[in-house]
Image: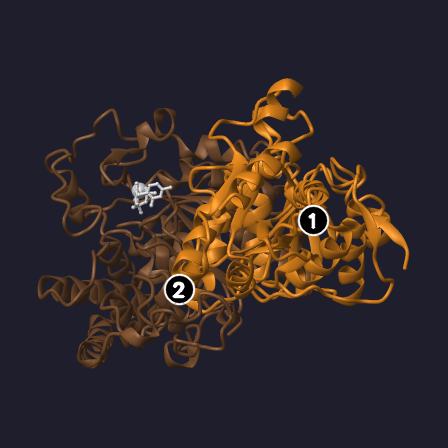
Amino acid sequence: MLLTPRHIKASGGKPPEADKDHDKKAKGGELYGHYAANRRVLDKSAKYFVQKRKTSNDAGLSKAQLLELYRLLFETRRLEEHLVALYRQTQVVGGVYRSLGQEATAVGCAYGMRDGDYLQPLIRDLGATLTHGVMPLAMLRQYMAKATGPSGGRDLNTHFSDPNVGILGPVSMLGAMVPVLAGCLLASRFKKEDKAGLVFIGDGGSSTGAFYEGLNFAAVQKLPLVVVIESNHYAYSTPTTTQVPDGNLVRRAYGFGVDVSHVDGNDVLACYEATKLARERGLAGEGPTVIVSETYRRKGHAEHDNQAYVEDNEIEAWAKDNDPLDRYIEFLVKGKYTSKKALEKIRTEVEAELDAARDQAVAEEQPDAQTHLQAVFDDGNTPWPHYETWWRGGPTHREGS
Amino acid sequence: MPEITFLEAVNSALKEEMHADERVFLIGEDIGAYGGAFKVTGGMLDEFGPERIIDTPIAEAAVIGAAAGAAMCGMRPVAELQFIDFISCGGFDQLVTVAAKSRFRNGVPCPLVVRGPAGGGGRGGPFHSACPEMWFVSTPGIKVVFPATAYDAKGLLKSAIRDPDPVLFLEHKFLYRRIKDEVPNEDYVVPLGQALERRAGDEMTIITYGAMVHTSLEAAEELSKNGHSVRVIDLRTLVPLDEDTIVKAAIETSKVMIVHEDTRRGGLAGEIAAVINENAFDYLDGPILRVTAPDTPVPYAPSLEDAFLPQVSDIVTKANELLQY
Ligand SMILES: Cc1ncc(C[n+]2csc(CCOP(=O)(O)OP(=O)(O)O)c2C)c(N)n1
Ligand SMILES: [Mg+2]
């Protein structure tokens, strides 16, 4: 694997090393935060996992939950592949932004939250959106600007919201949603609701002023905000070393005076576990946690980007050695949590569901042009479908559901 | 009815709305123990506690962003900017990107109020004297209010807080302690989107808002000494704009002049002139004229700032020009 100086140490197709003495150090107060060390559950050989963990898994997930996670990971990847196909058929309005290779972060982190919590995904967090409870059909409609999409064809991809189901779609202005999520949690505090918030941001987006202001405000107010920095090596074409000295997002995160968790972002269980703990801390009144997730964007910024700026072999190495789905399957099978056959069954089911959703969405209409002046202000018009048409609810086996 | 200052009117609107609706809270810099840079929120920390009077870091993106998030999740936040000039910092994005577009793009109402001291005359120089209204007048999805009296400040702020959409509420800092008028003790509102005829007249109309209402009224009084009958219209709300009252005045007086403290190019006067052209062109007996600040930043020295701000004499001179037609 080629390690170029512009990449941070932990990268290069290898997950960051787990710190074996982490718990001891944390107890002794050596670590600034509770989860300062690298968090990793999965191992290619499932060895670390087996040695360290007595119970079925440290994350404490049941078999049904482990399989549910697999279903979500697979669904995310396949749904994106459908979107790419539709894009090539010019059915998609605008671009397709892939999360290939980083699905574990979106899915795992969202799985660590609960029904009713607030989620702010970014374009590359389709997996988090599905995990929190949005139907794949809704995403297909969104990408094709259908009237039936959650935004009624008024905004793109993951850009749709309904606080009633905890979905706060992003605006394109990176960083802007961090203070907004803090505000949602302020509202929850007023209403005495037990809600936490999960906000995703890229390595690039974490350089914005709004990100700083929002996180700092949440920290001062001790709001239960979980901030996941998806450190996927690139912001469009810009490497992380251009965002922050040495590309060290972990060090920067400590500057906020919050707890920092450094996770192997291609390890779905590590992402899940880190988020679950961060959520619990937040709700215990200990404030926000930043989870820096080490992952890798295997596709270009969007489908149009040919990635000419990427070193030779880099993408291939990540695909070969560190694919989040491959790693998870290996863990599930080697750890005897399931059989290859059971996984195959899940895949078949998901494929059928996605095929049907695609056919349905393709056949639907764009919004009626007559509605374009509606609802700038409250004028009694509601040109967006009710969430019941796009919300399937959180995963059946997710904790708290 | 008791007479109270513009500032007291804002303060009492905030207090009354907080008592009436537990969803209302305030968020901003130095608004708690200190009571705000201009003391608009004086005494409110004691009355409502730090949960509802939230002091923030110096972070306008956080102030307005958190207010927007809370508004989207069912609260009625009122965000204070220490000086409205700081809207150019991160809060601008929160207002025009997050708040203004939330309903249209997602069907999520964002009923927040952003309020703060605006305007010149206080010798504040280029960074503490702004009239930022046009940045927001040209942003679909935000209502813009700029009151001129204590009565209106209170009634309009109550409307703004109860409104289901984002409202930018501009308080002219020169008026805070200089303007005093009768304000009822009972609850009342002044609806958004309704201009008010401050002075009757049939020879010409001055359309204005904010502190320039007072300057224009003085000018109209002076013109009346020469026998001229000048109508003065206070817009009070810039979005929604009361086009009916504007067009009616153009039709009835046939001569219209627009006065604003904001700078000239792209100022509201141009928009009002267009509305009149489209709806009352045949009735006009002369050009639509404007008296505005020139296209420069607000200067600091009193000699410079006085030259920058429209004065009574500027309005009288221009009105006499128009009355020639
Ligand atoms: C404030 C802001 N500036 C610029 C852009 C344009 N832009 C969209 S995505 C992107 C790259 C984002 O990179 P990163 O935050 O690392 O997220 P990733 O795409 O890697 O998930 C840029 C520059 C934007 N959306 N917002
Ligand atoms: Mg990135």
Q: Mark 1 falls within which chain?
A: B
Q: Quadrant location of residue A3? A: top left
| B220 lies above or below B198 | above
Asked if marks 1 and 2 touch (Cβ < 8 Å), the reply is no
Residue B148 marker: 1
Q: Is mark 2 within 8 Å of ligand 1?
A: no
| A67 lies above or below B61 | below
Residue appearing at x 66%, y 35% in the figure: B312
Q: Amino acid at mark 1?
A: Ala
Residue appearing at x 48%, y 43% in the figure: B289
Q: In x, y percent, where is residue B126?
A: 56, 26
- Indicate the secondary structure of the residue bearing disc 1: loop
Residue appearing at x 44%, y 34% in the figure: A250
Chain depicted in orange: B
Q: In x, y percent, where is residue A336?
A: 30, 66
Display colour for chain A: brown
Residue appearing at x 40%, y 71% in the figure: A374
Q: Quadrant location of residue A134? A: bottom left
Closer to viewer: mark 1 or mark 2: 1
Q: Amino acid at mark 2?
A: Arg
Question: In the rendered image, which residue does mark 2 sit on?
Answer: B105
Task: Identify which residue, B96 or A33, lies in the foreground.
Answer: B96
Asked if both marks, 1 and 2, belong to the same chain, the answer given is yes
Quadrant for the N terminus of chain A, please. Answer: top left
- Indicate the secondary structure of the residue bearing disc 2: helix
Residue furthest to the right in view is B2
Q: In x, y percent, where is residue A175?
A: 43, 44
The residue carrying pointer 2 sits among few (fewer than 14), some (14 to 19) or many (20 or more) residues within 10 Å by Cα, namely many
Answer whether residue A59 is visible to the viewer in this image: no
Task: Identify which residue, B141 or A293, lies in the foreground.
Answer: B141
Task: Identify which residue, A321 or B8, lies in the foreground.
Answer: B8
